[in-house]
Image (tube, helix red, strand yellow):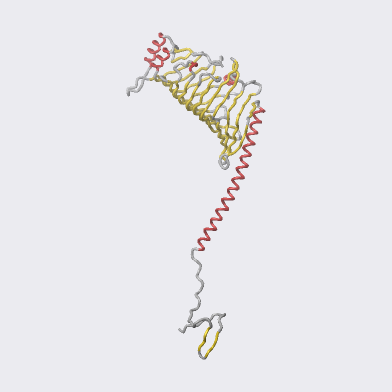
Amino acid sequence: MEAKSFIRPWQRRITHGEEELILGHDPVTELPPADPPEMDARTPLVLSHLKAGLVVFFTLATLSAVYGAAWIWLANQFDKRLDLWVQEQQASGLMVSYEMRSRNGFPGSMQIKLRGLRLIRQGLAGQNWLAEQAKLSLKPWAPGRLNFDISGRHQWHFKTNGGEKTMQATAADWQGTIDLRRDFASSLASHVRDLKITEGATGEPLQLAQGELSLVDLQSENPGFRVRLRNLELPTNLDAPLGEQVRHFDAKGQLKGRIGTGQWPHALALWRDNGGTFEVDTFDLDYPPLRLRGDGTLALDGAMQPVAALSVKAEGFFATVDALYARGFIPLGTSFATKIALGVLSVNPKNGENAYLDLPISLQEQTLYVGSIELLKLRPIRW
């Protein structure tokens, strides 16, 4: 095929003889310009990804705006519910005040912090509870569960029949949760670590390494309870029968009847008069050298002293009797007779485990009975 010659429009054509010259350019044979290149095949994919990214971006931005608005609304409702609770307590005679209040936590849990929280029962001069701080928090996705943190220092001032008392307490960690149902507490779970309680500023301390308390069905007449204590150290001036060290105490059961919030111990007396008791489904006490496991019932008698009827499995009872004699709680004759009687009743397993007793233990008129044996007299509680 004969090649065609292409001449640019700005070049002049001059004819001389049979030859055709183009000024400024030698005759040249040129091919027609190539067609424009096709679009890169990856371009539609890039545009698709860009479009998807924009959709995701605007979706997240919209969701973030909605979440932020919802969080602010819920936080405001949290504030209003707290204010309403304070007003309700004041109407019932309990004054609630605090030195400073703040709110934070976005975008996570809504938190309200109260510094210098004080509760004062009206009509009972001087009866109050003061906490160094209290933190309350709600998660937006679980508004029915209130979390609290009251770690730090506490002071409780109250009246007793013997006068007025002031108790001091410190806790390295004291937190818990309250499940709410229609703005009323339906259950409570709390744990504490390194708790120290003293009477006054210089009293003998009661110390607890770890403790847990759970209350369920609080809106019923018979709420359930569960207690777990680890490494409890009693005050030395309490003169406890087996010393100051309690390794652990676990118990669960039901509280029959409601204990009111009136003056102490009149609230307990009213609870007792209405048939209030502690029904213990199971308990486990490790108070060396004694180990008790069982169930039973506890209550208060007409003199506001504890009474109990328990069915237990007891281990370490011989060493317990020796310890009671050594600490002066029982005379030598009682110690000797008790060990003989308990030896007859004891069970000696063939597998080499420690001997134990299955028998009733009762407490009445400040006297502790093991079966029908009168073991020792207890000091009365002065409320």
- Quadrant containing the N terminus is bottom left
- Quadrant containing the C terminus is top right
Q: Quadrant of residue 123?
A: top right
- Judge whether 23 appears above or below 278 on screen: below
- Judge whether 232 appears above or below 15 on screen: above
Judge from the rendering whether residue 374 lies leftward or rightward of residue 301; answer left or right. left
- Judge whether 200 appears above or below 12 on screen: above
Q: Quadrant of residue 258?
A: top right
Q: Position of residue 331 (x, y in %)?
A: 43, 9
Q: Residue furthest front?
A: 24
Q: Residue furthest bottom?
A: 17
Q: Position of residue 166 (x, y in %)?
A: 58, 20
Q: Residue furthest top?
A: 333
> Measuring 52% from the left and 17% from the top, which residue is drawn there?
306
How many marks overall?
0
Nearer the observer, 125 or 33: 33
Q: Position of residue 96 (x, y in %)?
A: 63, 28
- Judge whether 161 appears above or below 251 on screen: above
Nearer the observer, 109 or 183: 109
Q: Quadrant of residue 265?
A: top right
Q: Position of residue 164 (x, y in %)?
A: 60, 17
